[in-house]
Image (cartoon, rainbow, N blue to C red):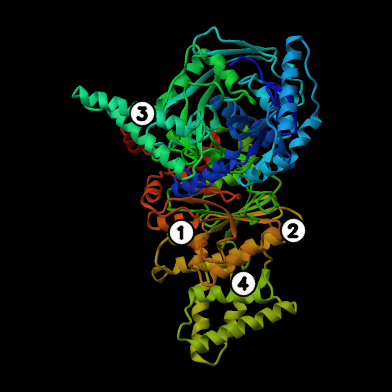
Amino acid sequence: MELQTPFKLMKNNLLLTKTGDIWAYYKIKPESIATNDIEKKELNKRMLAFVYGTLSKYSELHLQMLPKDMNLTERFNQLGKDFADEALPIAKYYANETVKQLEYELGTITSEEFILGVKLKSFQYSETIKGAISSSYDLFLQKAFAVLGYETVIDETYFKKFANEIEELGSVIRSIKGESLKTDELAYLIRYNFIRNMQHDVLQESQEHNFYKLTDTILDPTEKGFLKLENDTGNSYLAFIPIGALPDNISFSHLFEVAQSMKFPVELQIKSQYQEIDGLNGLNSKISRLRRRFKSTTQEAQQTGDRDSQRNLTNQLLIDELQNDIEDGKSILKWLACFVISGNSKEEVKTHSDRLINRLGLREIEAYRPNTDQLYLFYRFLQGNSLNGNKNWLQVTNNEGFAENLFAVSNRLGNNVGWYIGRIDDLTESQSLEQSIYASRKIVLFNPTIANKGIKGAKTDSPHIAVTGETGKGKSFLVKLLFIYMSFMKAKLLYVDPKKEIRNWFNKVIENEDMQRSYPLFVNHLKNFHYVTLDAADSRNWGVLDPIIFLKGADAKDTAEAMIEQIYSTKDKDMAKTAILKAIKTVISQRELGEQVGMLHVIEILKESDDLEIKGAGNLLYEMVTGSVLQLGFSDGSNNGVNLEDRINILEVSGLELPKEGDNPDNYSDLEKKSVALMIPLGKFCEKFGSNDTNSYTAEIFDEAWIFNVAKSGKKILKSMKRVGRSQNNMLLYATQSVADISDQEDHGQFGVLFAFDEPSEREAILEHVQLPINEQNLSWLANMIKGQCLFRDIYGRVGKIAIHSLFDEMTSSFKTINKSASSESEELYH
């Protein structure tokens, strides 16, 4: 092979080489598959095997996975368009710090881009003898002119000859989510070979279409095992690492998955060539020759009394399999796979190369970094260069074996633009959250405000977010992290804190002198939060949650009824229940006529009844309400509702005692029943908050939303809250213990995003909800998740395990719900 660039002409996604080959290049959108979803991976491989079989009419393929710069700075600039004006300084600060910290740890932040090249045909090919003579003569002239120092001129209209074939190929590629590259993209693809790991402007490099300028780089192979690139942009080092041998059983080799699992950017390229079956140099002839050779070797071993070598026996079995594949009509490919590591120094490249080679070795895949062939491999893998003539590092498989490389499969999750919330966790099991975080370079960005904006490719328009899982697994930490990031955005927020805890956590940061000195922006931001405390001890708060005051019609009636039912059972008390319903209806009508009435008037009507049962119900309710937390929801109608005009509101309720998740409602104490009763109008209050101003984005965050599934009529109220969604520019963040709370038919599509932390009693239900196979492997996968790890289903329907991560100590400190003791720290020290 001559060490030269092959490029002659390009137009759109088509590349003509100096030898007359025409290649078509396509960008393939990766199929998102969770690390542990083996069934979906197998289905994907079967589909790819079919496509590879369909493409056998073309002579060669070029599979590429390139680490594409995510350009985090530009992504945060785009996110910045939705920063709230009053939060602009702090939002910009954390955006810049996020980029700085991630790039300090990971270098250039990259994602995977998959490119498929297909060799169509060459000048020599023609359908007729006359055409064959003509094209051969053209090629003869081209070579003759080249010897004399001239170059034949071919313009872009040449590609029009292949329009039908290109359209036919395009229909196949579209079946695997492929789209043709544009001319600029193809130009950058070529240029990338010569500027790997160099700082550059992608747009600027893409606009250069001159092949001389695209390849303007000094290639220095003098350092054994490395290739140095040098140009005006800078310099970098490369190492090409070819696959020398695969295990005899290549199932689950998943080369592209291995490349993505490394902590540093890894490029993987595979050039493959379909093999002819018949003819002198066809596979059938080669198999016959190999059989004769193996037979001779076996006979020699028998004559000398030696046993036939295991390797010889294995080769014979492989030849038998190859023969069977041919007879079954499978395509046979010869292919060369090569990983590419780039870096700023030889030491960096060597370290990363060694780690990759060791990782491959664990899968019984032999790979190495050749000392003298780096330049050869560089040219061999240039776009447009054929595999013809290469005899080293070759693998031979059928199309099904070739599909085992798992091309164009990724487990990326999250939004393209958003705040950093953690990493994709590829580890099956980890000892600590830190191990999972720092073993991954796949960052997760999340923007909770865009799910209902009609995003292209999204599987849902629902704006709502569910966070489920066992207490102590990290739900509250994630909810508060999302709340802080949402407070930077153009959104009006209501955080409902029925336990009155969040103010205490935030105040610890505000009052800490070290925090004030080190993080003044964050401390001042926390000070701007507006707290509204509903305290029954303050008469000014009486009735702020009275449904007859702040609701109307059926909403007022249903909520009032549910509140009373929560604290007074009407089972087998038809007379009392009827009287309660009539009294509620009467008071609502009086309120609509302008009278100053409220829930206490419902009780007064009952007390004045001549029926002893009804009168007794009224007296009991009066005693239960008077002097209790229920005065927040039962009033004489003289107080107005809560005013939440500020942008960031935290609504506290003082004096509540909520039961624990999982407690039997029949065993609730009187105070717990009263507390649950008040959560009912609180839910309706959230619904009203979300629907008042449809022109502004609003969000409610409910960290104890499970209450609605045990409260009377709570599920109905929750559904009303969720209906205030896309049409009214509102989002509900719903945290609950059980995934069953969001799994009924009506709920299933109402939560566009799900974070599911482990809950031991619901592992099968969790897997079913996110549509992962229920098997021992996945159940163990869930069981091994530790605090801070969860399954994440994004707006695109992609599912995977992530490790939640806050980059900033000041945020982490403000979310802590448990203070470690000296004993607990000692326990971890010797773990």
User: Is residue 420 something that shows in the picture?
Assistant: no
Instruction: Indicate which disc residue 292 carries.
Output: 3
Neighbourhood count class around disc 2 (C-alpha, 10 Å): few under 14, some 14–19, many 20 upward: some
Neighbourhood count class around disc 1 (C-alpha, 10 Å): few under 14, some 14–19, many 20 upward: many
Viewer-nearest residue: 262 or 62: 62
Q: Name the quarter where the C terminus is drawn.
A: top left
> Which callout, 4 or 1, points to the residue nearer the camera?
1
Image coordinates for residue 27, horizontal then vertical, percent: 65, 37
Residue pointed to by mark 1: 738
Viewer-nearest residue: 468 or 690: 468
Q: Name the quarter where the N terminus is drawn.
A: top right
> Which callout, 1 or 2, points to the residue nearer the camera?
1
- Sequence-wise, which precedes: disc 3 or disc 1? 3
Image coordinates for residue 47, horizontal then vertical, percent: 53, 47
Q: CA distance from mark 4 to mark 2?
A: 30 Å
Element type where label 4 sits in the image: loop
> Which callout, 2 or 3, points to the residue nearer the camera?
3
Element type where label 3 sits in the image: helix
